[in-house]
Image: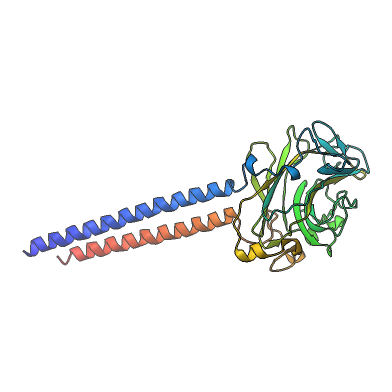
């Protein structure tokens, strides 16, 4: 009887141990599937250009109908800007030129994404070209000035595609360099420091003299600003900037501008495509007057007090998709280690218990 009892106990323990390992294996597969899906969501986060959500009144596309000075035009241009059937050239490869193009229709979308197809090219050799392109979402439009052909102390958002290094002491970053800035009009752009004092984040990108057009995606949704780049024309977005706590109002205008100085380049806009993002908001958010929001960024400290990390993003900002993935991966590895240790301890205890039967 005692022998049968011991056999029954061993059988039950064996089945229990087998079930635990099966459950753990199932958990491990589920967790890995989640991580794979999570990384896929990170790469697919930027819209694939669904035509259903394309807002044509805010989009600039070939052959550029609706561009000009007439009352029905949806885009105005200024300065050295030349509109052809293939591209909008903001500046030619000549010295001391400025040009811009602006949407005449204010944007009343709370969540949006702008895709910019562009090309920067010229005869200048390495470090002998400038200055770059700026993409704007601002309260005022068609105000020429010293910031890539637009006014300083602007109100709104600017994304700078800076091809020339002014700060000879800032050798920790590579140019061309893409950066973002949000201003309520009280902050100026510091050319001498390449805008670093007001920069929210950025990344280097080899965007000049490519054999193909390059792409930029700017997404604003639920207070989050994300900038992605496709430099190699592989239809693969790479994250450049991801900042939370950004407040931008509705009713502002999109535009693009460029400038040359003693050095020059051709700065071409091929297209600017605006997409509406279908995002749910709370009743409180829906009832808010979004036109009265002041452009701002809710950072723990001011941008100039932040220290750049190697990727160009500020430490202390919200977790990006890849950071979340790495955190989940580390957590999963911790769980695996704990589970293995637990299984070993359980097996040792089983072997010890066998000696008493």
Q: Image point 16% across, 62% down: which residue?
A: 9
Q: Image point 83% across, 49% down: which residue?
A: 165
Indicate left or right for 317 with 95 as reference: left
Front residue of 154 and 141: 141
* Residue 88 to residue 327: above or below: above
Q: Quadrant of residue 1?
A: bottom left
Q: In this view of the protein, can residue 131 be seen by the observer?
A: no
Indicate left or right for 75 with 49 as reference: right
* Residue 356: % across, % down: 16, 67
Q: In this view of the protein, can residue 158 be seen by the observer?
A: yes
Q: Image point 17% across, 60% down: which residue?
A: 10
Q: Quadrant of residue 334?
A: bottom left
* Residue 352 to residue 61: above or below: below
Front residue of 197 and 337: 197
* Residue 85: % across, % down: 81, 31
Q: Quadrant of residue 152?
A: bottom right
């Amino acid at each position: 009887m005692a022998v049968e009892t011991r056999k029954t106990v061993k059988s039950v323990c064996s089945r229990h141990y087998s079930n635990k390992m099966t459950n753990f294996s199932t958990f491990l597969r589920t967790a890995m599937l989640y991580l794979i899906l999570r990384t896929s969501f990170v790469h697919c986060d930027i819209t694939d250009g669904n035509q259903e959500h394309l807002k044509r009144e805010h989009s600039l596309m070939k052959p550029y109908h609706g561009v000009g000075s007439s009352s029905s035009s949806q885009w105005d241009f200024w300065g050295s800007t030349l509109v052809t059937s293939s591209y909008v050239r903001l500046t030619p490869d000549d010295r001391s030129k400025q040009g811009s193009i602006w949407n005449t229709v204010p944007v009343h979308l709370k969540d949006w994404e702008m895709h910019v197809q562009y090309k920067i090219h010229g005869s200048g050799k390495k470090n002998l070209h400038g200055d770059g392109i700026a993409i704007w979402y601002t309260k005022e439009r068609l105000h020429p000035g010293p910031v890539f052909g637009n006014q300083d102390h602007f109100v709104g958002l600017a994304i700078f595609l800076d091809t020339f290094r002014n700060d000879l002491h800032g050798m920790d970053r590579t140019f061309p360099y893409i950066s973002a800035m949000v201003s309520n009009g009280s902050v100026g752009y510091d050319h001498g420091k390449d805008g670093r004092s007001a920069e929210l984040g950025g990344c280097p990108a080899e965007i000049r003299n490519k054999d193909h057009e390059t792409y930029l995606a700017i997404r604003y949704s639920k207070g989050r600003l994300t900038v992605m780049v496709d430099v190699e024309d592989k239809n693969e977005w790479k994250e450049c900037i991801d900042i939370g706590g950004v407040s931008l109002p509705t009713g502002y205008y999109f535009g693009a501008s460029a400038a040359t100085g003693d050095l020059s380049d051709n700065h071409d806009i091929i297209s600017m495509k605006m997409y509406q993002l279908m995002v749910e908001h709370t009743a409180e958010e829906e009832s808010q007057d979004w036109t009265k929001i002041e452009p701002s960024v809710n950072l723990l400290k001011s941008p100039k007090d932040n220290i750049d990390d190697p990727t160009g993003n500020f430490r202390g900002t919200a977790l990006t998709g890849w950071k979340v993935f790495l955190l989940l991966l580390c957590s999963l590895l911790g769980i695996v280690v704990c589970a293995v240790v637990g299984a070993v301890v359980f097996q040792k205890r089983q072997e010890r218990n066998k000696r008493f039967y």
